[in-house]
Amino acid sequence: MNKNKIIELKKIEKVYKMGTENFKVLKEVDLIVNEGEFLSVLGPSGSGKSTLMNILGCLDSATTGEYYLNDTLVSSMNDRKLSNIRNRQIGFIFQSFHLLPRLSALKNVELSLNYSKISKKERLRRAKEALDKVGLQEKYNYRPNQLSGGQQQRVAIARALANNPTILLADEPTGALDQETGKQIMMLFEQLHKEGKTILMITHDQKIAQYGDRVIEILDGELFENRGVNNV
Amino acid sequence: MFKENIMMSLENIVHNKMRVFLTVLGVIIGVTSVISLITIVEGATSDIVEQFEELGVSQLNVQIFGTPAKDSLSPQDLLDIENIENVDVVSITTSTTGTAIFEEYLMEDLPVIGKDYTSFQQYEDDLIGGRTINKIDVANKTHVANITKEVEQQLFRGKSGIDKTIFINGISFKVVGILDDGRSSEEIYIPYNTVMHLNGGNRIDSIEVFMDDTSKGKQITADLEKILDRIFQNAENSYYIFDIADLLEQLDEITGVMTAMLTGIASISLVVGGIGIMNMMLVSVSERRSEIGLRKALGAKKSDIQILFALEAIIISIIGGIIGMILGNLLAYLAAVGLSIPFKISVGGTILGTIFSITVGIIFGWSPARKASKQNAVDCLRDS
């Protein structure tokens, strides 16, 4: 098991000021994610898992501690550099999809490529390729409201894949879907994992968490390793 | 990227047609009023200027009132004035009133105006029959007259007066030309040096000073004043110089002030329009928080978000500007037809309208766009 470290967190803390009191959402979190891993972070709401996800996704910065992404220290970068990291290295998948309602599936996927310096032709090629990968080759020109929930989440996954990011960050990807559709989405994640994608998924659902090959529990801002596979 | 932003903005605008229309109405009204007012003022001014220019910018009209000691100009005085640098020629006007008789018809208290042939040359345009009084007439002190068509009507009762002989204060004059100056005035014109035959006097009422070089008007006026002051020994109100170029300059100043004032008033409505745009953009920002959050997650920088929203505000105000320009010119055209003044699309007004509308978009779109760019991505994504 001598794989590359994709993510390394060292004593990450996040503190929110609530009036005069400080509220510690994350407490000295250490975490290593290796290349090709499918890691589930399991925790109830209010456990700090969304904050962790936002810090990992470079949307939010930690109060203290160091965050290395691909051996680069990102915890001290400015907006411009962080935007670049989000664009190149991170593929976000949200619970509520966050598709732009007035754009076609293809245009929605292209959106993530708009912020990198890629030619129009190449953007279109990559967007189509990503949609093909999630099984939506027939739906390029459909708008979100013409697609089912599962299909919308597939568009969102295609959008996350289009830039070929270092890591996929999924926040409750099945939270807005029924069980059957949720299962299909998880199978898509498994397939992407088999193809070598590094995935970090956050969920409160024990069953969904089991799709990962490693499960970490988060409780009151602290991480607990949990060799999940035997622990259903 | 820029093209995509514009496409996105246009799509948003189309999607919110009604809201955008109501918002943009303020800008439309603002630009329409700026352009129509400026165009109408410019048209009216050019009409007035044209009328004054017809009177002649190349001449100075000097009314001679005189003083008790010296009530007129002597031949030597006239020579002095003619010797001013860049003065071409001085033409004398001397007038009296008289009674004109033709057969059994009679007109009393008619103004009889004597002028030099240089001045008569200017009446060519007003001539509706016969000829004007010429150099030879003046040189020979010939008893010839030009009469206005009102005088012809009264004396000749609808028949032509040309080549007929009339009597002015008992002295015979041959009518050689009929004038129509458009002012329906009853006047008789004769060579200036024949007026004294009528009343024995030789008072000069006014002179017209013709200039070689109109650009030297100021200098000539100053020289003229110096000479006249010397002639009348600095007596107040002994003469009055009427300079059309000077008048035009004043007119220009007045219209300049008027245009600025009207523009100022009209720009108030542009400010109101701008506030409308700002309000709409602020609503748009809070409606599109999810989009802002997503774009940031996908790698949009603060500046990308700011450009996206600022561009939308600018496009909206430009649309308003274009519609306002069309409406403004249309309105100005209708007004010009109604007031029968010339219509010409105002370049200044159009440029001003364009600059105004873009500026309104930039100024009032800036703060909402900045607000959008400063949104916290995490909050935006969580809220929706």
Image: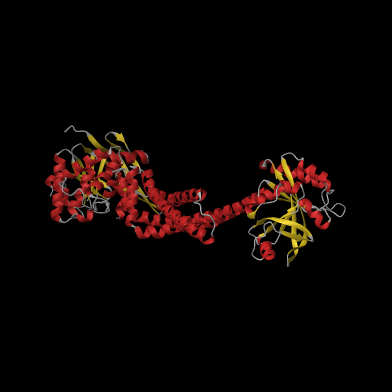
B49 sits to left or right of A165: right
Q: Nearer the viewer, residue B62 or A206?
A: B62
Q: Nearer the viewer, residue A69 or B66?
A: B66
Q: Which residue is located at x 73 percent, y 46 percent? A: B136
**Which quadrant holds the N terminus of chain B?**
top left
A214 sits to left or right of B154: left
Q: Nearer the viewer, residue B226 or B89?
A: B89
Q: Give percent across and percent down for residue A118.
A: 28, 37
Counting labels gives 0
Q: Give percent across and percent down for residue B60.
A: 71, 48
Q: Give percent across and percent down for residue A26.
A: 30, 47
B365 sits to left or right of A191: right
Q: Nearer the viewer, residue A57 or B236?
A: B236
Q: Which residue is located at x 68 percent, y 65 percent? A: B154
Question: How are the residues colored?
Answer: secondary structure
Q: Which residue is located at x 77 percent, y 61 percent? A: B98
**Which quadrant holds the C terminus of chain B?**
bottom left
Q: Give percent across and percent down for residue B107.
A: 73, 65
* The residue positioned farthest toward the right in the image shown: B69
Q: Check the image and report above or below for B158 versus B377.
A: below
* The residue positioned farthest toward the bottom in the image shown: B104
Could one spot residue A209 in this view of the protein?
Answer: yes
Could one spot residue A61 in this view of the protein?
Answer: no
